[in-house]
Image (cartoon, rainbow, N blue to C red):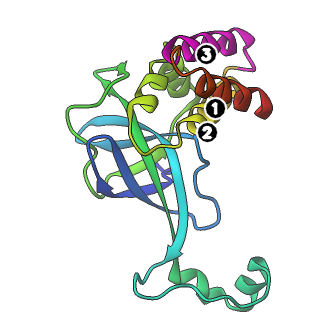
Amino acid sequence: MTDRIGEVIQVYTTRFLAQSDNLLNPPYFGSFVRAESQGMSIYGLVFNVYETSIDPNRRAMAFGIEREELLKQQPQIAEFLKVEFEAAVIGFNDAGHIRAYLPPFPPRIHSFVYPCSKQEVLDLTEDLEFIRSINSLPGLPVEELVAASIRLAYGERGSDRNFLVRAGQEIAQLLKDEYEKARSIIRRISDGR
């Protein structure tokens, strides 16, 4: 596959960290990705993207000019930067069936990461179980991540209003004791359409 977007460099049961293949075009926050590992597709949602120096002991310096101009004047600077992204695991493909729960093992280090196809996004979001997965993982920007992923799935579904209604109902049911959180997510979904 040639559409890979990164390589896994650290793994946990519930998330993985990958280094992006493209400094200028990392995956979007809330995008659906898959890591191919040991014959299994492991699906995740990108919840953190950051750019840093390749040398952990050396920070980037300010040059006082716009990034595009700096890279034109000194293209070698790009060689000293890297983009990494983190994805929360939301499911896996088990013999052709999408399972919306944690896989039996995380992806392996040096596994490649790819963007999910339209069909994979449709399959992953059909029962909306991924919302529950996101909500249960500690340390995630839940409101923003749920809203971003719903907006992305809505677009992949051809702006299917029925999907938005079902997503709103799922959020309301899941967060029935957290009214403000549910309201915040729904507001973020509608603001971004």
- Residue in the picture at 53% in, 82% down: 79
Q: Give the range drawn in magenta.
A: 158-175
Which numbered disc, 2 or 3, marks the residue that appears first in the sequence?
2
- Residue in the picture at 59% in, 80% down: 78
Q: Mark 3 points at which residue?
A: 167
Q: What residue type is labelled 2?
A: Glu
User: In the rendered structure, are the residues bearing label 1 and label 2 in contact, judged by CB atoms less than 8 Å apart?
Assistant: yes
User: In the rendered structure, are the residues bearing label 1 and label 3 in contact, judged by CB atoms less than 8 Å apart?
Assistant: no
Q: Where is residue 105 in the image (x, y as percent from the top left)?
A: 21, 38
**Quick check: 143 left or right of 130?**
right
Cα gap from disc 1 to disc 3, whole angstroms = 10 Å
Q: Position of residue 125 (x, y in %)?
A: 52, 21
- Residue in the picture at 55% in, 69% down: 51
Q: Which amino acid does label 1 sit on?
A: Ala
In terms of secondary structure, where does tag 1 sit?
Answer: helix
Q: Residues within 10 Å of mark 1 (few under 14, many from 20)?
A: many
Q: Residues within 10 Å of mark 3 (few under 14, many from 20)?
A: many
Q: Please identify the dominant SS of the magenta region.
A: helix
Q: Where is residue 113 in the image (x, y as percent from the top left)?
A: 42, 49
Q: In which quarter of the image is residue 106?
A: top left
**Quick check: 69 left or right of 126?**
right
In terms of secondary structure, where does tag 2 sit?
Answer: helix
Numbered badge on residue 147: 1
171 inside magenta stretch: yes
Numbered badge on residue 144: 2
Which numbered disc, 1 or 3, marks the residue that appears first in the sequence?
1
Q: Quadrant of residue 34?
A: top left
Q: What residue type is labelled 3?
A: Ala
- Residue in the picture at 43% in, 38% down: 44
